[in-house]
Amino acid sequence: MTALDALPPTGPGSPDATGEASGEAGAGPWRSAWRRLRRNPAGIVGAVIVVLFVLVAVFAPLLAPYRPATAEWFGQVTPTSVPGPSAEHPLGLDSFGSDLLTQLLYGARSSLVIGVVSTGVGLAAGALLGILAGGIGGKVDTVVMRVVDVLLSIPSLLLAVSVAAILDRGPLAIMLAVAAAQVPIFARLLRASLLAQRGQDYVVALRSLGLRRRRIVVGHMLPNSLGPVLVQATLTLATAVIEVAALSFLGLGDPNPAVAEWGRMLVTAQARLDQAPMLALYPGLAIAVTALGFTLLGEALREALDPRSSR
Amino acid sequence: MLTLVVRRLGLLVVVLFGLSLLLFAWVRALPGDPARALLGEKATPAGIAAINERYGFDQPVWQQYVTYLGRLLRGDFGASINTGQPVVQTFTERFPATIELALAALLLAIAVGIPLGYLAARRRGGWLDHLVVGGSLLGVVVPVFFLAVILKYVLAIELGWFPTSGRQDARIDATHVTNFYVLDGLLTREWDASWDALVHLVLPALALGSIPLAIIVRITRASVLDVLGDDHVRTAQAKGLPRAIISRRHVLRNALLPVSTTLGLQAGALLSGAVLTETVFSINGIGSYLFDAVTQLDYPVLQGFILFIAVVYALVNLVVDVSYGFIDPRVRVS
């Protein structure tokens, strides 16, 4: 399938095609990537999941039957049982007496916000380091990459816990914590991608034309590195959703235990695992399905942007 | 080979030095006064002054750092502000539980992952291949703690096949030599203690093993596919070598190199995952220790902890790099 795709004259993903005409920066490869993406069933499933997730997160207040984390029906929860599905509560109550469906829908919201913000921050900071290292090179490269090595020498969860410890518990801490763990990944990716292009003909040509280094790096090499970064960002969103849940699972999220966060819902559900296993099942599935969506979409993007990788 | 080890150890020293500086700066940047945090509601100016003097919080910052560095060099990672126990001591008591869990998970993942990945590649496009590819995707997207909770509910609570928590049945009077419970039982010939520890280990190891398993299967499959297309394999086939010998000598040996690289990278993920798994199965490893330290702002414990983990992590990666030389002699040359 992919062998046929490579035939059209606008060669996919080849940097030379985008580098020479800065006017219409690479409409060709992006368009053919989009065509390949649409033909990938796994990618479509991923995209549908992601779109649904975003819609649920954005429209949670309209979709949810009640307000979140109210503990309004706490009186109905007894030490030995949590009310199951009923006409008023389609999925039943959680162990704090809030509506379970409402909690799940609002959980999507907090996952999306924290996941997107943390990935955005991690991407921005990592990209900056990567551009410094790969674009300037020399001593700057050595110093930046040593810093990245130190960051990488700390397991990501530990890094996240450290950040959360500095900032105290709360959503902001989780965002920065997850972002901190992502910085070295993006820095390395962008550096490697820039280094790979340094010796390419179009860069040599631009240099011989007398263009400034900043102009070459920012205006030409960077746009050609966006593909892998986009793929990595999508895949990182999957791990971000899981890491966010892991941190709130460990109690580093919102101090309010009844908050609508998937990770936190899962941890409180553990105490009643023998009475109401569904309380653990729903948030766990929500995390897994969301992560699956981003992973499928990310893999499909990778194949679409770099057809050689799918072989 | 020796130069590699020496150079890497040198790099480790540099990284550790940088890390100690970062950690020191980080702990000073924490909000809240440690003495106040320690005394809580009962904080009086005199009490705070006493704590500050005892732990040196009242000295100039650079002097605190020099003292700190000097202690580190002597192997003194400080004592917990809360319990007064030396960090190193608590570590040696608790770390074996975490290591035992991580090793069990890794062994499980290797034992299952490499054969599965190999078979999937050999029968590419078959039902096993599809199952393996789909399953490894699930292994990546299902969080460890969720898998742990499911396993605990189904296999321990509903079916009662395995214990729900802990490392060993409290009724077993076991002698602990190394704090690796399975090993302890073997050393003291208390077979039932060893067996019980092993049974307690099954579910946590299954849950934690899902992370490296998914990755090992994927990498093995991909690299076996890669090697199968190589010229030397075709030559071996053309020579008429038996298939078993081709698989073992020519395919697997080459294909396992990328797999061993990823094993080193898994150390961090395993450790983080172990912390999460420990909380689900109430295992007294370093996980709970770390989180007590975070909530109580126990600086010495946090600093010692991160440095210790960084050393372990770096050494694991060094061992992995050195082992390339044995798996692939070409590395030794370059």
Image: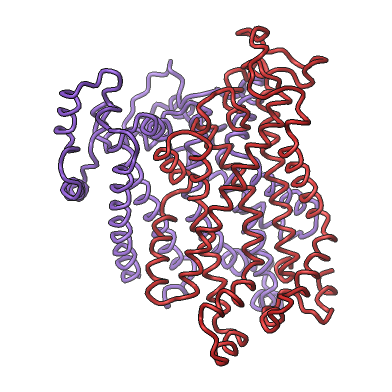
Chain colours: A red, B purple
- B227 in relation to A250, above or below: below
Q: Position of residue A47 (x, y in %)?
A: 78, 51
The number of callouts visible is 0
Q: Where is residue A209 in the image (x, y as percent from the top left)?
A: 57, 92
- A58 in relation to A185, above or below: above
User: Residue A62 falls in which quadrant of the image?
Assistant: top right
Question: Where does the C terminus of chain B fall, quadrant-wise?
Answer: bottom left
**Res. B186 in view:** no
Query: Taking A163 as reference, is B210 left or right?
Result: right
Q: Position of residue A144 (x, y in %)?
A: 41, 66
Query: Taking B236 as reference, is B305 left or right?
Result: left
Question: Where does the N terminus of chain B fall, quadrant-wise?
Answer: bottom left
Please name whichever residue, B42 or B121, is drawn nearer the observer in this view of the structure: B42
User: Residue B84 falls in which quadrant of the image?
Assistant: top left
**Res. B228 in view:** yes
Q: Position of residue B151 (x, y in %)?
A: 63, 30
User: Residue A211 falls in which quadrant of the image?
Assistant: bottom right
Please name whichever residue, A124 or B201, is drawn nearer the observer in this view of the structure: A124
Q: Which residue is drawn at 43% across and 63% down?
A: B321
Q: Which residue is drawn at 48% across and 26% down?
A: B282
Q: Which residue is drawn at 42% across and 30% down?
A: B288
Query: Taking B307 as reference, is B195 left or right?
Result: right
